[in-house]
Image (cartoon, rainbow, N blue to C red):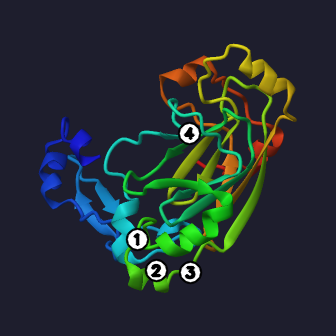
Amino acid sequence: MLKTMAYKDPVAAAAQKYKPIQSAVPGTTLGPIQIEAFLGGGKLYDTPGVHLHHRQAAVIHADDLPSLAPQSRLKGRCFPANDTDVGLSGNTLFWGGLVRIDVVKALPRTRLTFYGPKKLSINMVPTTEADEFYKREVGVMLTPPTGQERAEGWCGLQGVRELQIKYEELDRPASDIAISGLGWIAVEPLGVPSSDPDSSVEEEDGDSGELHLRVHVPKPVEVFVRAPLPVGKAASQWYRYQELTEVEEELRPKWHY
């Protein structure tokens, strides 16, 4: 903000030398910080961040917090990739040691695209082997938590959310699964390209129009399903603006001027 203001306001340009410290660790800003940033004499204040108990940052060790901070522009990571024939049904995906997704029911070409910190690896194993894999690899391959000591004191993935995701159109994502404080996963019923032009018709006729996923996270991290965000140029092919429903209007925060 100060950098943008500096183009027109010499006071803001000078204030950049004294901007507050940034940190991935909550609690760096202990109180309001006054910044002389306006030529007309107005003040800009940096205030302490709000600690939210339902975010991933509230449950992991302070030394692991930097791994959750985005270091560059988010880029989706797709599972399965376009060059593989492996389906998701019957498999489990681990997003670091913080999220587990059991794919109970999906189409042969269903794809999950993860948007979040690059430092968190994504690993897929058969669901029948998932419990043993997590127990063996948490703190090692599945991080955060990082290291054996933190893994031993780790609370685990005790929060479980059963998701029945319905879809009406096969040429667009069905929804996003958002993990509070971490990122989101775009769910595409037919996201993986097929070399068989008749395959999409067969899949559509042979499925009930519903995907079943089971999401595990630490308690009390929130998991919620929302309409898909239009990410990237490809989104222009399917995104359509929709007015809020009466229920959504009622739940939306009100602004008072």
- The percent position of residue 207, horizontal first and vertical second, equals 84, 33
Compared across the picture, whether 39 is left or right of 122 comes to: left
Q: Amino acid at mark 4?
A: Pro
Task: Name the secondary structure under disc 2.
Answer: helix
Mark 1 or 3 closer to N-term?
Answer: 1
Q: Give the residue pinned by disc 2.
A: 151
- The percent position of residue 253, horizontal first and vertical second, equals 66, 51
Q: Give the residue pinned by disc 4.
A: 80
Q: Nearer the viewer, mark 3 or mark 4?
A: 4
**Residue at x 31% of width, y 57% of height:** 44
Q: Amino acid at mark 2?
A: Ala
Q: Is residue 93 above or below residue 220?
A: above
Residue 114 seen by the camera: yes
Q: Nearer the viewer, mark 2 or mark 1?
A: 1
> Is the residue marked by circle 4 packed among few (<14), some (14-19), or many (20+) residues within 10 Å?
some
- The percent position of residue 21, horizontal first and vertical second, equals 24, 65
Q: Give the residue pinned by disc 1.
A: 140
Q: Nearer the viewer, mark 2 or mark 4?
A: 4
Q: Is residue 112 above or below residue 15?
A: above
Task: Name the secondary structure under disc 4.
Answer: loop
Q: Give the residue pinned by disc 3.
A: 155
Q: Amino acid at mark 1?
A: Val
Compared across the picture, whether 228 is left or right of 213 comes to: left
Residue 27 seen by the camera: no
Q: Are marks 2 and 1 in contact (CB under 8 Å)?
A: yes
- The percent position of residue 123, horizontal first and vertical second, equals 50, 54
Mark 2 or 1 closer to N-term?
Answer: 1
User: Label 2, label 1: how many angstroms apart (C-alpha)?
Assistant: 9 Å
User: Label 1, label 4: how many angstroms apart (C-alpha)?
Assistant: 23 Å
